[in-house]
Amino acid sequence: MSADWHPTACILCECNCGIVVQTDGGHLAKIRGDKDHPTSRGYTCNKALRLDHYQNNPSRLTSPLRRRPDGSYQEIDWDTAVTEIAAGFKRIAETYGGNKIFYYGGGGQGNHLGGAYSSAFLKPLGSRYRSNALAQEKTGEYWVDAHFYGGHTRGEFEHAEVSVFVGKNPWMSQSFPRARTVLNEIAKDPARSMIVIDPVLTDTAKMADFHLRVKPGADAWCLAALAAVLVQENICDEAFLADHVDGADVVRDVLRTVPIDDYAKHSGVDNELLRAVARRIAAADSVSVFEDLGVQQAPNSTLCSYLDKLLWILTGSFAKRGGQHLHSTFAPLFSPGGVGRSPVTGSPIIAGLVPSNVVPQEILTNHPDRFRAMIVESSNPAHSIADSQACRAAFESLELLVVIDVAMTETARLAHYVLPAASQFEKAEATFFNLEFPHNTFHLRHPLFEPLPGTLPEPEIWARLVRALGIVSDDDLRPLREAAEQGRDAYTQAFLTELGANPALGKVLPYALYETLGPTLPDNLKGAAALWGLAQKAAITYPDAVRRAGHADGNALFDAILNTRSGVTFSVHEYADDFALISHPDHKIRLEMPEMLDEIRALRNTRPGLTTPEFPIVLSAGERRAFTANDIIRDPAWRKRDTDGALRVSVEDAEALGLVDGGRARITTAAGSAEARVEISATMQPGHAALPNGYGLDFVDTDGAVRVPGVAPNELTSAEWRDAYAGTPWHKHVPARIENAQSDLATASA
Ligand SMILES: Nc1nc2c(c(=O)[nH]1)N[C@H]1C(S)=C(S)[C@@H](COP(=O)(O)OP(=O)(O)OC[C@H]3O[C@@H](n4cnc5c(=O)[nH]c(N)nc54)[C@H](O)[C@@H]3O)O[C@H]1N2
Ligand SMILES: Nc1nc2c(c(=O)[nH]1)N[C@H]1C(S)=C(S)[C@@H](COP(=O)(O)OP(=O)(O)OC[C@H]3O[C@@H](n4cnc5c(=O)[nH]c(N)nc54)[C@H](O)[C@@H]3O)O[C@H]1N2
Ligand code: SF4
Ligand SMILES: [Mo]
């Protein structure tokens, strides 16, 4: 074992905490938090210590695979795979048009560098439509954010006097830096408060000063009532609204008509407690709000995004310590604008992403504009998109499906070709989830191991595919290649000149950087070449903040990124910068959204609750727990407990349904049926049950047997069950029937 500690990062959630590891052969033998990481500062949660189960995963792919007509796979060499795949997509583009090639994924929680090269292959082919998991959670919020201020905001929980978690359980799901440490600090400090809006008594809710235990799906009424208290009790921040907000009066007129007591009742929350929460928010110097899947994947999700942002806007908790902030971005996670509507279902394309839920419908049809071919990179949509059955049928009907992954996934099993990627510890890698303010950081991870034989890093895979298209020649690249040898300044000059002179280069930009700057980069960091362009852009977009962080220009920032093993602070903002980051010309928050105001008015005539006598229980399909990490780790041995992902049910429901703790239950929804182990839990309220996310992945055990521990949640979800504005799924709100399966089991074993 090597005694050196190598800096890298945990890849299991968007925090990407810095870690240091000792390696032993191909193993991550010892893992600790990295005290030098500028954001996580030594922090990790329990999951980071289990990362070797990702790196050494028996499902790892080690050769490109081509499907035989009988459905089995044949190992083929890289040259054959690349030639056939490039020819296949070219044929699709020539026959039907390049916009029939659909791209899904591009990165999970910790690996966004590979996807940064995809456009060099997709653009020349004419492919335009894409999507990824953000289109099944964050697009509704993005739509509201775009309207309000044209950016993404984050709370500064470390310093917030009041922290509000709406459908968010950070003790388990993290998502902001050093989450458990910060939650403990808030809980201990009598001057600070934590407010949790969640139907479940989660670990976070247990620490909260105020727990608004809403009925599942009733958040819109609860949030409308909270905002209405601010208005009706005249406790908004008038000076802030006058100076920095446009349209506040129209919004206040609507909120003035909200019957607060009725809405508290509809949402299952005590009226006095709800008012106390609103008053606590109004009295605070700073408020930070985090909304997540509990509302983003439930009915009225876009409306809830609108309403929960009113809590900090109406109280002016912006551009100050502990408040909500617009932050710098190193690389865009979303492409603004996009192409409007999806070709078959006409669904809204928000942030450039087709809603995940409509993907099967965009394929499984005779519509002439249907997608004919698909590339999936670092995602497992056959398992992670609603309605797995429809996904399987859709993907099987494609003329060409190529999957780039480290493991043989449910989606890979449907592909014509599977390309094996080097793992995230075998290549230069990075996350683009850089969402902090006032200090924002970027971490380029250096490879710890050689790529597993037979695998390639994605930048190289994309480069080979682009080369096979034969659209850029060596002559096109030569001037840039020569300039790269002469240093950064020469390269910058040549880049501007060549890009102007040779439009073909513009279409394959990341590829051009990879082929010309890439070979000059040290330490197996060729794949980091695309970061050069992003560093230039960051320096141009935030010149003062980048300089304050100690980087004279884009080249200096790029070199700091290459040379700093534990991550770099790339921007240092001042609180007042928040206003400058508002993209509207007057730099004011634009509050009026007529559709959302109509939705608030419409709450009066509806009631929460979508269950039926046939499906009387609300199932949350896909909760985050101590040992869940989306679909990133397939080997169930990584879990220290809950190995089969229990169905959590309330004491009351268990009694009514005759369920026993540790026994089996059958869960049936409109989409499907599954069986799970029962955990009776006092944390659940009657009528609400929960299954974890990331289970039901098939796995070939050491004895060669295929095992599928737990329930694949999307065997139980329906594609139509989605938000009207953003198309985001209602995974947290699936009407279900739950029955005791013990008797079935007895019959089966008899
Ligand atoms: N351990 C772990 N951490 C993770 C991940 C993981 O897989 N495992 N995944 C990462 C990813 S990709 C994401 S997007 C985040 C998600 O992070 P979270 O959104 O925090 O995760 P969830 O547990 O899916 O849902 C949050 C909460 O919503 C509540 N909820 C259910 N129904 C409702 C409702 O109707 N209203 C309200 N208000 N709440 C409701 C649930 O009780 C739950 O506590 O986690 C990240 N972190
Ligand atoms: N029912 C239900 N469905 C859900 C959710 C839910 O709560 N309930 N949550 C949703 C949310 S919020 C999210 S974010 C999605 C996540 O779902 P997906 O978008 O499918 O993403 P991951 O689960 O992160 O899958 C990552 C894939 O990347 C592969 N991988 C890992 N490292 C590498 C690498 O270096 N290169 C390549 N090429 N591949 C790699 C893994 O093997 C895995 O197959 O699931 C969504 N689906
Ligand atoms: S799972 Fe998330 S919070 Fe936990 S160590 Fe990994 S990156 Fe950090
Ligand atoms: Mo997510």
Image: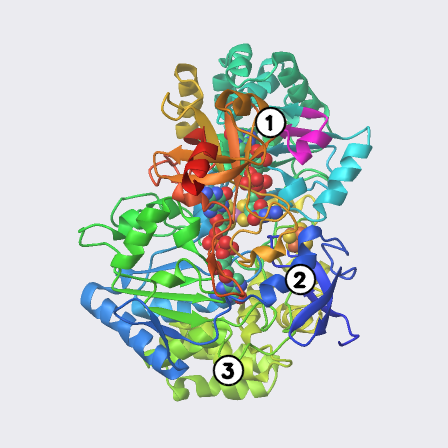
Image label count: 3
- Give neighbour class at mark 3: few <14, some 14-19, many 20+ (Cα, 10 Å): many
Residue 11 vertical placement versus 93 (above, below): above
Which numbered circle lies on residue 9? 2
**Of callouts 2 and 3, which one flags the residue occurring earlier in the amino acid sequence?**
2
Q: How is the image coloured?
A: rainbow
**Of callouts 1 and 2, which one flags the residue occurring earlier in the amino acid sequence?**
2
- The answer to whether residue 523 is visible is yes
- Which residue lies under the disc numbered 3? 516
Q: Secondary structure at mark 1?
A: helix
Residue 468 vertical placement versus 377 (above, below): below
Q: Amino acid at mark 1?
A: Leu
Q: Secondary structure at mark 2?
A: strand
Q: Residue at x 74, y 32 (%)?
A: 161
The front one of 612 and 206 is: 612
The front one of 714 and 111 is: 714
Q: Which residues are magenta?
A: 195-210
Are circles 1 and 2 on residues that touch, CB within 8 Å?
Answer: no
Q: Residue at x 38, y 76 (%)?
A: 465
Are circles 2 and 3 on residues that touch, CB within 8 Å?
Answer: no
- Which residue lies under the disc numbered 1? 314
Which numbered circle lies on residue 539? none
Residue 199 vertical placement versus 147 (above, below): above
Whether 413 is among the magenta residues is no
> Is ligand 3 within 8 Å of the beta carbon of the residue shown at mark 2?
yes
Q: Secondary structure at mark 3?
A: helix
Which corner quadrant holds the N terminus? bottom right
Q: Residue at x 59, y 63 (%)?
A: 54
